Amino acid sequence: MSSHVERFAPSPTGSLHLGHAYSALLAHDAARKAGGRFLLRIEDIDTVRSRADYEAAIYDDLAWLGLSWEEPVLRQSARFEAYRAVIEQFIERGLLYPCTCTRKQIAAAMSAPQEGSAGPGVYPGTCRGRSFADAGGDYALRLDMRKALVSLGGAGVVKKLHFKEIGRGPGREKGKIALDMAALIDGVGDIVLARKDVPASYHLSVVLDDAFQQVSHVTRGQDLFEATPIHRVLQALTGRPTPIYRHHDLIRDEDGKRLAKRDDARSIATLRMEGAAPDDIRAMVGLAG
Ligand code: GLU
């Protein structure tokens, strides 16, 4: 068997729609064509919004589409210890700080003229430098982006970090995409990597699990292209390998808006109920024949 490993990683917080079907079919077809493996991962770190009935519906829709995947399926809710271990290492390395800002405070800070270099929509670092002793009962753990990049060797080393894009980004980016220290500090900033009681965030869990599952190719929508430099930084910080990325165009509705989980009209379940066949779904996402 080849070392080509693809995964489809839905969150069980809603119904699968055409965009998910597109990701799953692309990943599955690429794995089968390469004689590789296709994995399914349930991204259920949000234990409040994740629901067993959505998870059951994901299996049902994917099987109906004609996909098969390896068992057992990895669920992120079973991986908290692994995430916690990395969070603890990051704390020891001084890369995380506790942030006690409320959502309201963050929204106000982000819309106000920014201090320092952080761009619009970027957390301005209000709690940077806060000690754990000072943080009290509830906090988020933020990555000190500048400190993290300096620990990797600074701008000269960071610009040598890259990932390979075999699909395309929203601005048609493809090929070798290099990281940029200033863009990460000013445009991404100090992202949340965990909460006091939940040792993971999307960014951290996806990076650790892609490595854990030996994923060689990440196929996902262009909405996650902007997250990929963050993932590349986390791979560098944790010594995990970098998969090849294939970001695909987003499936849009008639008005050109991207589909969201709440658009039940385009859910696979609704299309099935209306009599669509698996091949119709393939045709709708441009994968016919
Ligand atoms: N769980 C994410 C989602 O449902 C996708 C994660 C990924 O493909 O990296 O949008």
Image (cartoon, grey):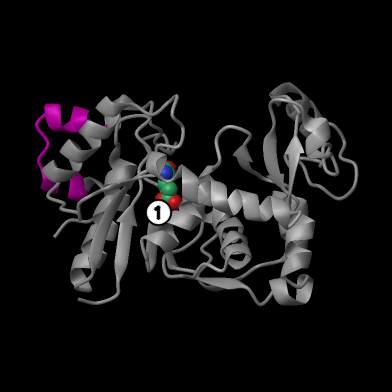
The stretch drawn in magenta includes residue 277: yes
Pinpoint residue 245: horizontal percent, then vertical percent: 44, 65
Q: Amino acid at mark 1?
A: Arg
Seen at 76% across and 28% down, the residue is 101
Q: Is 133 placed left or right of 239 in the picture?
A: right
Seen at 78% across and 70% down, the residue is 154
Seen at 63% across and 34% down, the residue is 196
- Image quarter where the N terminus lies is bottom left
Q: Which image quarter: residue 197?
A: top right
Report whether residue 247 is seen. no
- Residue 62's place in the image compared with 240, above or below, is above
Pinpoint residue 115: horizontal percent, then vertical percent: 90, 42
Q: Residue furthest right?
A: 115
Q: Is 204 placed left or right of 267 in the picture?
A: right
Q: Which image quarter: residue 112?
A: top right
- Residue 214's place in the image compared with 221, above or below, is below
Under tag 1, what secondary structure? Answer: strand
Q: Is 217 placed left or right of 164 in the picture?
A: left
Identify the main secondary structure in magenta. Answer: helix
In this rendered view, identify the residue nearer to me: 180 or 265: 180
The stretch drawn in magenta includes residue 278: yes
Pinpoint residue 185: horizontal percent, then vertical percent: 76, 55
- Image quarter where the C terminus lies is bottom left
Pinpoint residue 210: horizontal percent, then vertical percent: 42, 59
- Residue 178's place in the image compared with 101, above or below, is below
Q: Is 6 placed left or right of 187 in the picture?
A: left
Disc 1 marks which residue?
220
Magenta range is: 267-283
| Circle 1 residues within 10 Å: few <14, some 14–19, many ≥20 | many
- Residue 189's place in the image compared with 156, above or below, is above
Report whether residue 8 is seen. yes
Query: Does the beta carbon at disc 1 come under 8 Å from ligand 1?
Result: yes
